[in-house]
């Protein structure tokens, strides 16, 4: 089906006993998470699918991407009134309005649940997951057993609601990481080159807000064999694809040799190819840490990181850059090498590596009250998707 902004909600419910699945899209990041989920269900003729755009500060521009997805688009207000069998969320916001949904499931778009907002954990804080003291979601998918325990410590009312399924995106990255030499070649990085990754989240507490222009300008003082690739969070661009102020100022100061990963390209190739990373507190830094490599953190404002989270643990084991200087970051990285505790960190944010697809699929069918239709046959399509992601990174 093509994009149908004016479609009647009831028309997307297939005849007979078909289950209706709704994807609630907030922004580009959550959309990509939901597309991964959809690949696990798309071939089941017992299901019908639709999407809706939830109100979100960063949601503008998603309508075109949903259109390319090929699902009917239901107006948000109409979608909240419809009795969906399953409503799937990749971000918080508006889930409590879907009172007629048979099940509401939250699928996080990152790992490690390390960011703070409004003074509490953004993934599992009570203001985000409870309504009138009761859980908003029927189930919340989590990547790790430790994450489940932390979620229940943060908000005890979530006990019994957390399903540990692993992480689809991390599993895809592990496959790309296994082809690291190809990723480097696609980026034009030679065998003797040293590739420095700048992993930047968004907001006033992130790397780009912390002396971003000075940090990027210092790339001019790096040796000739050192290459720099900047991966900002997609929220650093506005709906028209223009850099927001923090990113715009940093790019204006950067030399032309700095490679930028735009929001429509996969992050995976750059994170696989890099030799070391300078990072703030975004969860992608945890993915980089899956392969032992040097890492250097930039300062984080008090209250920006959830205490005891995997991101907090990562920052504790890596040196912190006192001044915005990439030459100094390079010195620190070469002096300290890969943090010795990285091997013990990975199980804290991803359990069941390589098993996220069958585990997520099984949990979704349980919520749908349907038998799982045999082994998933999406391997070939998933492999092709991984190749497209790797190619896009160049």
Image (cartoon, rainbow, N blue to C red):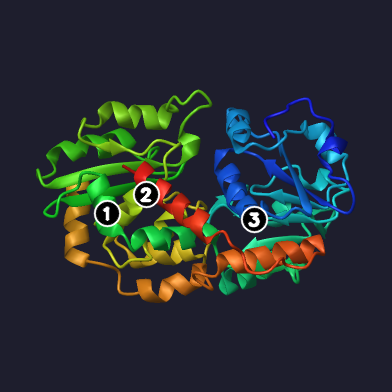
Image quarter (top left, top right, bottom left or bottom right) of the N terminus: top right
Q: Nearer the viewer, residue 198 or 127?
A: 198
Name above or below for residue 55 compared with residue 98. Answer: above
Can residue 322 be seen in the rendering of this structure?
Answer: no
Q: Nearer the viewer, residue 274 or 125?
A: 274
Q: Determine whether the residue tagged by mark 3 lies in a helix, strand or loop.
A: loop
In the rendered structure, the answer to whether residue 180 lies left or right of residue 348 reads: left
Percent position (x, y) of residue 275?
Answer: 24, 57
Percent position (x, y) of residue 294?
Answer: 26, 62
Q: Which residue is mark 1?
A: 182
- Quarter of the image where one finds residue 108: bottom right
- Tell which circle, 1 or 3, labels the residue nearer the N-terminal end: 3
Can residue 382 be seen in the rendering of this structure?
Answer: yes
Q: Determine whether the residue tagged by mark 2 lies in a helix, strand or loop.
A: helix
Count of marks overlaid on the render: 3
Q: Which residue is mark 3?
A: 107
- Tell which circle, 2 or 3, labels the residue nearer the N-terminal end: 3
The answer to whether the residues at label 2 and label 1 have Cβ atoms under 8 Å apart is: yes
Q: Determine whether the residue tagged by mark 1 lies in a helix, strand or loop.
A: helix
Q: Which residue is mark 2?
A: 390
Q: Nearer the viewer, residue 48 or 99?
A: 48
In the rendered structure, the answer to whether residue 183 lies left or right of residue 392 reads: left
């Amino acid at each position: 089906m093509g994009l149908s902004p004016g479609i009647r909600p009831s028309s997307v419910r297939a005849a007979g006993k078909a289950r209706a699945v709704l994807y609630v899209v907030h922004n580009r990041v959550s959309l990509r998470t939901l597309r991964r989920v959809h690949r696990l269900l798309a071939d089941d003729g017992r299901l019908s699918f639709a999407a809706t755009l939830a109100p979100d500060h960063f949601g503008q521009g998603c309508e075109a991407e949903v259109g390319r997805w090929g699902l009917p688009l239901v107006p948000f207000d109409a979608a909240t009134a419809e009795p969906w069998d399953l409503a799937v969320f990749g971000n918080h916001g508006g889930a409590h309005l879907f009172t007629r949904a048979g099940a509401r499931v939250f699928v996080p778009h990152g790992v490690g649940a390390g960011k703070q907002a409004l003074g509490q954990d953004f993934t599992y804080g009570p203001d985000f997951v409870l309504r009138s003291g009761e859980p908003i979601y029927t189930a919340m998918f989590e990547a790790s057993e430790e994450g489940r325990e932390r979620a229940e410590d943060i908000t005890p009312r979530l006990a019994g609601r957390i399903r540990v399924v692993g992480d689809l995106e991390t599993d895809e990255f592990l496959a790309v990481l296994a082809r690291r030499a190809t990723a480097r070649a696609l980026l034009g990085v030679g065998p003797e080159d040293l590739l420095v990754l700048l992993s930047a989240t968004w907001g006033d507490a992130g790397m780009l807000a912390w002396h971003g222009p000075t940090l990027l300008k210092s790339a001019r003082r790096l040796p000739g064999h050192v290459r720099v690739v900047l991966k900002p969070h997609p929220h650093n661009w506005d709906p028209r694809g223009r850099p927001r102020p923090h990113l715009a100022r940093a790019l204006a100061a950067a030399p032309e040799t700095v490679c930028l990963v735009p929001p429509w390209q996969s992050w995976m190739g750059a994170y696989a190819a890099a030799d070391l990373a300078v990072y703030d507190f975004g969860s992608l830094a945890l993915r980089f840490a899956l392969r032992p490599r040097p890492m250097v953190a930039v300062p984080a404002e008090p209250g920006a990181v959830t205490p005891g989270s995997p991101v907090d643990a990562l920052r504790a084991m890596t040196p912190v850059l006192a001044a915005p200087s990439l030459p100094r970051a390079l010195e620190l990285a070469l002096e300290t090498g890969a943090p010795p505790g990285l091997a013990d960190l990975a199980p804290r944010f991803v359990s069941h590596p390589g098993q996220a697809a069958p585990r997520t699929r099984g949990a979704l069918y349980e919520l749908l009250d349907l038998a799982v239709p045999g082994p998933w046959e999406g391997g070939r399509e998933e492999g092709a998707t991984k190749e497209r992601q790797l190619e896009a990174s160049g």
